[in-house]
Image (tube, helix red, strand yellow):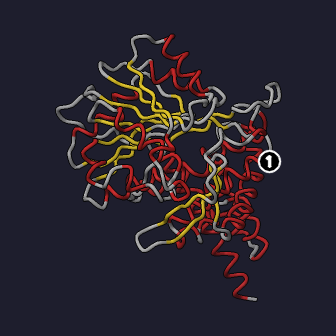
Amino acid sequence: MDWVRLAGGVLTVLASGYAAAAWWASRRPLPAPAVQGDDGLAPVTVLKPLCGDEPRLYRNLASFCRQRHPCFQLVFGVWEPDDAALAVVERLRRAFPGCDIAVAIGAHRTAPALPTVNPKVANLLAMLPLARHERLVIADSDIAVRADYLRRVTAPLADPRVGIVTCLYRGRPLWGIWARLGAQFIDEWFVPAVRVAHAGGSQRFGFGATIALRREALLRIGGFAALADRLADDYWLGELTRRQGLRTVLSEVVVGTDIAETTPRALWSHELRWLRTLRALDPAGFALVFLTFTWPMLVIGLLLASSRALALVAVLGAMARTLRCRDAGAALRAPLRDTLLLLEWTVAMAGRQVRWRGTRLAIQWTRDGVASAAVGASPPRPHDRADMQPPSVSRRTR
């Protein structure tokens, strides 16, 4: 039928076109923001919510202690006083006695309506009173940074028109094929999608790997309490400041984030949460995301409509997709990676729950955005994922 061939041709062209655009955008260097009158050395407080003794936690946190910055403070927050992450913090204090470190313990006391409060936000609410500086950096616990990180990510905050500064990140697989596939999810799909959107002028970004902002901008949106019932609190920090007329800056700094999944179940659960979160933030845009899954889309397109011209277009699309891979092994896994994404996207189109570190969050659409509510009153458990342990590590509670 003519419409079937037309659909196959359109699918092949669009999938190849996106693959080429993603390759092009990924090659473009992110411009360093123009900064006048500030070299990024103003005092800054780093807020680090913690939950359990993750793999490489000490190494990642130590990278923040080694910053080449004249005045910075680290504030860590945990849910319970017996959290295993506290032992890592004490080790940091011994190793870096000159580092200004504070700890907030018992975030549940700041969240009396526990079932409707994002657990990470509850942690941040408890940590903020300990922050001593006007500039704030919120960063996930599983990222590692270079010594000039704080200076570079906070420098754009000298411009009063800037709301937040955020960073892209690269996946650092810890062990095994499932972690490597997880890193490809970030490096070959998520990051290129952001780069394409950024090249098109979008500022709708906010990533938990890094968000830098001024305390004044945080208070203008109502503080962390404004995020208490929202899914994707990092995104909403940016969105709510943009609604105040402030710009979002995508920094040229790229940090590393650990990918620790060792089983298909763990990888599936983690990526399904990400995809359902994206769907909750932009349902219409998410419906078209299938066009970014290059390999299965090219196969389906050619099955529906085969011709020499379309085959050439598909070859060019496949080449552009392959060039996004960091090595030959990743290139060989790319068809599997894209097919797995297609399956996850299909499942993510339905369902209204995501799971974050042992806490189930129900997705609810509201008039002004997307809210999240914990199902049940159990506090977050450290990862709640024993299958993220390396084979050589005992399966203790982290």
Crowding near the residue tagged with mark 1, few <14, some 14–19, many ≥20 C-alpha atoms within 10 Å? some
- Is 133 on the left-hand or right-hand side of 224? left
Q: Which of the 4 quarters of the picture holds residue 203?
A: bottom left
Across and down, in percent, residue 397 comes to 73, 33
In this orientation, does residue 27 appear?
no
- Judged from the image, the secondary structure of the residue bearing numbered disc 1 is helix
Position in image of residue 83 (x %, y %) = 60, 31
- The residue at 61%/29% (across/down) is 82
Front-most of residues 215 and 251: 215
Image quadrant holding the N terminus, namely bottom right
Q: Which residue is mark 1?
A: 264
- The image quarter containing residue 318 is bottom right
227 over 164 or under it: above or below: below
Residue at coordinates 71% horizontally, 64% vertically from top-left?
A: 298
Q: Residue 319's x, y, as percent?
A: 66, 51
Compare residues 336 and 367 and report the one nearer the observer: 367
Q: Residue at x 80, y 48 (%)?
A: 264
**Quadrant where the image shows the C terminus:** top right
Q: How many marks?
A: 1
Please give left or right for residue 66 compared with residue 334 in the image: left
- Picture residue at 35% right of the left edge, 32% below the top: 130
Check the image and report above or below for 88 versus 237.
above
The answer to whether residue 15 is above or below residue 31 is below
Front residue of this view, candidates 59 and 12: 59
Q: Amino acid at mark 1?
A: Pro
Locate residue 105, reporting x and y percent: 49, 33
Of all residues shown, which one is farthest toward the left? 37
